[in-house]
Amino acid sequence: MDEIPARLATKPSWLITQLAVHVRRLVFDGFAEAGARGYHYRVLAALHEFGAASQAELARRCGMDRSDVVAAVNELAEQGCVERRPDPDDRRRNTVTLTKEGERHLRRMDRVLDSVQDELFEPLSAEDRRTLTRLLTRLLTHHKPG
């Protein structure tokens, strides 16, 4: 960081931006090797944690645009990771359910993300990692709309 102007290098916002660029590449590359995308992980994680959901619910829970959810669900359905069925209470809606293959795929993606976390945060102790996570969560919560 010798060649970076101090005005930049001392700004946490600049540092976070630079780190975000690096982590996006690591995650993208790792998921690509696993035949997945970040949107897949979001959808599968939400279905695993909260159970079957409509595509609109998935969009809200995952912080995704509905059209992106539709595309991700289509791709995941083609891979056998999710099943989409008409909602028995409202035939205009689809309910998306995680399959056993989806659970296996989610575990593979978990391993990718665990590896990325280990690589990214290698210089930090376990306590430093917990502190960083707590501080980032506080900031995100403060700035989240609603």
Image (spheres, grey):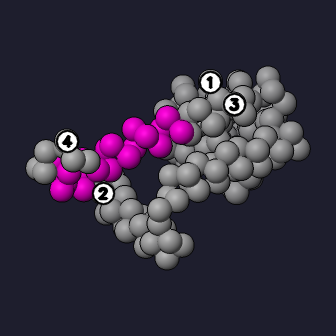
| Closer-to-camera residue (145/41) | 41
Q: CA distance from mark 4 to mark 2?
A: 32 Å
Magenta span: helix, strand or loop, mainly?
helix
User: Which contiguous range is marked in magenta?
Assistant: 8-26
Residue indicated by mark 4: 3
Residue indicated by mark 1: 71
Q: Which residue occupies 37% across, 58% down? A: 140
Sequence-earlier tag: 4 or 3: 4
Secondary structure of the residue carrying numbered label 1: helix
Q: Which residue occupies 64% across, 50% down? A: 115
* Amino acid at dot 3: Glu
Q: CA distance from mark 1 to mark 4?
A: 42 Å
Determine contact: label 1, label 4, CB under 8 Å.
no
Q: Which residue occupies 63% across, 37% down? A: 30
| Closer-to-camera residue (143/91) | 143
Sequence-earlier tag: 2 or 1: 1
Residue indicated by mark 3: 33
The mark lying in front, picked from 4 and 3, is 4
Sequence-earlier tag: 1 or 4: 4
* Amino acid at dot 1: Ala
Image-based side of 38 in relation to 100, left or right: left
